[in-house]
Amino acid sequence: MHVVGIVGRAYYNKDNQDIIQTHDAVRRYLYNRDDVVCLTLLPTEKDCLNNLEPGEDKVDTRLDYLLDMCDAFIVPGGTNAYHFDEYVINYAIREDKPLLAICLGFQVLCSMFANERSKFDMSKRVDLENHLGKPDEYKHEVIINRDSKLSNILLENRIPVNSVHHDIIDFDMHTIEVNALSDDNIIEGVEHPDKKFIMGLQWHPEYIVDEYSKKILDSFIK
């Protein structure tokens, strides 16, 4: 049995209270597997991280015992990121535990390896016509780098994906490598070449569980 830690995301209830809970689509992405149990990991900071500057000192390290219990991690999409996201990502890289970072999680992962992190711009927007669609519908294709781990997983050069994001990654990065691009040259995926499975995707495989999403999930769990 594998324990997958899912970083919590903020939602608003009917009283407009900010509630941190498990990303439901990600939970359902794992739900039908009989070899996985999910553990929700809640950020400890009060303030969200919108400028994505380093701040691991703001995280309560007493949560490490929960991370030690996990075999792998998912950092999902959402509206607000926290320093805890970065803390979990760094833990996964350091311990070489599988990590799947999706949409906002992907952007946090990329920002951590930016050559000039101060230039990360949360106001940089994509062409909404091409990239902002419904989560359960294909919006465009991505081109897969033939020399990437993602290519070895999918065994395809191009795949259709959904697209539900406003911000883009348009800066130079070190260590991690780009494994997927959109037709209009937007970075759609990255991976760490020296780790078993450290991967970030701009699209949402949990919303369209097609053959490609299943291959990614199977590889992540394996």
Image: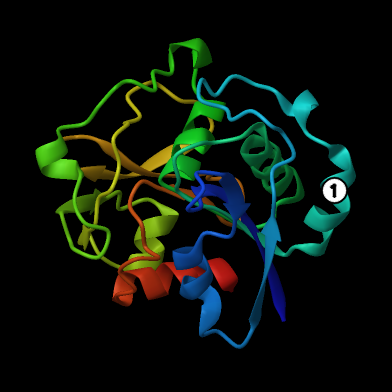
Tell me the colour scheme of the image.
Answer: rainbow
Q: Is residue 126 visible?
A: yes
Report the residue at 61% width, 35% height from top: 82
Q: Is residue 4 left or right of residue 149?
A: right
Q: Is residue 140 left or right of residue 101?
A: left
Task: Establish if 87 lies above or below 197.
Answer: above
Q: Nearer the viewer, residue 178 or 101?
A: 101
Report the residue at 50% width, 27% height from top: 111
Q: Quadrant of the C terminus?
A: bottom right
Q: Is residue 8 visible?
A: no
Please, what secondary structure does the residue beneath circle 1 have?
helix
Q: Quadrant of the N terminus?
A: bottom right
Q: Is residue 131 left or right of residue 180?
A: left
Q: Nearer the viewer, residue 213 or 126?
A: 126
Q: Position of residue 176 (x, y in %)?
A: 50, 36
Q: Position of residue 195 (x, y in %)?
A: 61, 50
Residue designated by label 1? 64
Q: Residues within 10 Å of mark 1 (few under 14, many from 20)?
A: few
